Image: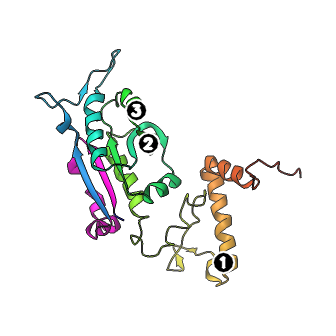
Amino acid sequence: MTFAATILTLYPEMFPGPLGLSLAGRALGEGKWVCDPVQIRDFATDRHRSVDDTPAGGGAGMVMRADVLARAVDHAVDRQPGVPVLAMTPRGRPLTQARVRDLAAGPGAIILCGRFEGIDERLFEARPIEPVSIGDYILSGGEMAALVLLDACIRLLPGVMGAASSGDEESFESGLLEYPHYTRPAEWEGRTIPEVLRSGDHAKIEAWRTAMAETDTRLRRPDLWERHEGARVQSPSGARQQKKER
């Protein structure tokens, strides 16, 4: 099955962009995924091909019009029925590795790239569109966010990474940050590779990696650690169990 990505954008020339290189580029050339950028302005009806207008209630900037975007979305859905429609916007739900895996396991996605001050909210009321954010910061538009989303999905497609298990221990796959990595030379600027990694004792290495992943997550991402700890105290039925008093 080929993963088909339709990107609704004001800048179709940005695609595939960096996704035409490295693993994603090779997968594109091999037909493991296809990239179909669609110009939103093609769905405007006036001679200026307008896609935005001033915000209702006043304020700075411009807002993308619901009527124009709806025509673009409907066009994409007609061509690619049954796939999720996502809108890249800072008002969306944060993207997670679990959601990426769900998307990568499917036939593809339609991705709407926001611009200007945002998208007329009525579009989300009228069409089944999933707002998605890649972080708590502002970009110039949704195109860069769409590239991030697609890269995360494409690397999980069958045959894209060298080994099927290549991504199993990476950050966020287990709910933790990944453990630190080392390679040759064994000593560099007075710093040596931890002895346990040179011991050949696979059980000790695994225990060290687990401990380091937990420590780094607790220190660097307390939000992830809190969720991880919450998941560990769930009973098989899903009910929370009380931690034993020490």
Where is 169 relative to 92, above or below? below
The kind of secondary structure element at disc 1 is: helix
Residue 17 x, y percent position in the rendering: 26, 56
Q: CA distance from mark 1 to mark 3?
A: 53 Å
* Residue 133 location, quadrant: top left
Number of residues whose C-alpha sits closer than 10 Å to that of mark 1, classed few (under 14), some (14–19) or many (20 or more): some
Marking on residue 196: 1
Residue under pointer 3: 124
Who comes first in sequence, dot 1 or dot 2? 2
Q: Which residues are magenta?
A: 3-32
Callout in the foreground (1, 2): 2
- Disc 3 marks which amino acid? Phe
The one of 245 and 199 positioned closer to us in this rendering: 245
Number of residues whose C-alpha sits closer than 10 Å to that of mark 3, classed few (under 14), some (14–19) or many (20 or more): some
Residue under pointer 2: 132
Q: How is the image coloured?
A: rainbow
Residue 6, magenta (yes or no): yes
Residue 159 x, y percent position in the rendering: 40, 72
Residue 171 x, y percent position in the rendering: 54, 60
For the view shown, which residue lies furthest in the top direction? 57
Q: Check contact, mark 1 vs mark 2: CB within 8 A.
A: no
